[in-house]
Image (spheres, rainbow, N blue to C red):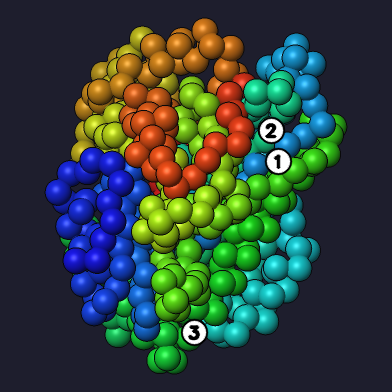
Amino acid sequence: MNTTIFGEHERRVIDQLDRCVAQEDGALGVLCADGHLGYSAPIGGVVAYREHVSPAAVGYDIGCGNLAVRTGLAADDLRPDLAGIMDRIYAEVSFGVGRRDGHAADHPVIDRIREADFEPQRALADAAAKQLGTVGAGNHYVDLFADENDEVWLGVHFGSRGFGHRTASGFLSLAGGGRFDERGREGEMEAPPDVLHVNADLGQAYLSAMELAGAYAYAGREVVVDQVLEILGTDSLEVVHNHHNFAWREAHGGEDFYVVRKGATPAFPGQRGFVGATMGEPAVILEGIDTDLAASALHSTVHGAGRAMSRTAAAGKVRRRWACTNRDCDWFQAPGEHKPRGGACPRCGHATLSKRMVKMTEGAIDWAAARRDLAKEGIELRGAAADEAPGAYKRLGEVLAAHEGTVRILHTLTPMGVAMAGPDTPDPWKD
């Protein structure tokens, strides 16, 4: 098997990469050190096909990526107002799945969607317009950092929102013989990925649709960064911007490939990338270098620290349930139960119930302790939950050490403020 593996991984993750590579004779594969299980293809996986592209390997969040900008602000000057600034960012930037309060409906990328080469995408233009400039949930964020020179950086991480998800889902449906407007067959995590021949009509249509979803993701990150720069009252002096869920046409070893990176950052010699860690640890600006080892990595590197445990393992099982609003009562609706008649709590008789996220089982992360640790470090946290705590992730320094000889670190970015969707955001893909 033509694969290169960085770091240590459980067998199931390696098997996922092997199944992706096996879809085409002579395909190449790389597993970065932040790798972990994904759907059909591992997060942190890179697959180079000569004649195919895989919507499953690119994933549902087409064009998910990182954008970092260096501002003209000094961190010491910002810190006295940091709490208020983070309050404004969290209040004015739209976080959460299903948000439709974007503020860039007149962006040129929306016109491109209305005139998309792949005609079914055109019907998604109105929804895309409403979401452009919203961040989403999960591990997507808006962060402020201080570098080693006390300069403030702004970093964001998110992708193509509902537009990209519907595009990916539609092509997975088409690959299985369905219609674009049907939800794609997700299958088992260990299922082989669907692949499309690049010379077939469907393969050409996917490449065009994927590129447009990537342009939409780029635009969304730029819109949010401009919004936060306005809050900060400053400008961008330096920009580092990359996708890490995408497929590129590239040359490697004198041959042309379609290189799919799922949760992996392109890092050609001299190409810079912004790689986040956890909400409590330094991120980095890095660049690729010209070595044989870097070439064996298909000039790819990590996109983050990589999960050390699943969201459920970290936070426990959380579900949206009817629950009592009396703070002295812990009643919530059990699976299969309906909202009590009359709307009163059946345990304490309190008159008001609300539907909210409640913890069904405990997780491994003590979220209250994690928040206290972040506060001790002077990090202003807004939103987030236990599934995104530092303890749920690997250490970025360790995964980068596994890629020594392929990249160099240019800047170390220490977190000052972190803003993410909170634990009470809507369920995925209800938008």
Q: Position of residue 362 (x, y in %)?
A: 24, 24
Instruction: Locate residue 75 relative to residue 163 in the image: left or right.
Output: right
Marks 2 & 1, CB-CB < 8 Å contact? yes
**Residue at 24% of width from left, 32% of height from top?**
313
Quarter-wise, where is residue 53 in the image? bottom left
**Residue at 80% of width from left, 26% of height from top?**
73
In this rendering, the count of numbered labels is 3
Provide the residue designation for mark 1. Answer: 69
Say which label, 1 or 3, has the lower sequence index.
1
Secondary structure category for the residue under label 2: strand
Q: Which mark is residue 153?
A: 2
Residue 204 in view here: yes
Location of residue 286 with respect to 38 vertically, above or below: above
Q: Position of residue 154 (x, y in %)?
A: 68, 35
Instruction: Locate residue 128 relative to residue 108 in the image: left or right.
Output: left
Q: CA distance from mark 1 to mark 3?
A: 33 Å
Q: Position of residue 18 (x, y in %)?
A: 20, 63
Which of discs 1 and 3 lies nearer the camera? The answer is: 1
* Nearer to us in this view, 249 or 280: 249
**Residue at 52% of width from left, 40% of height from top?**
408
Amino acid type indicated by mark 1: Val
Secondary structure category for the residue under label 1: strand
Amino acid type indicated by mark 3: Ala
Secondary structure category for the residue under label 3: helix
Q: CA distance from mark 3 to mark 2?
A: 38 Å
Say which label, 3 or 2, has the lower sequence index.
2
Provide the residue designation for mark 3. Answer: 205
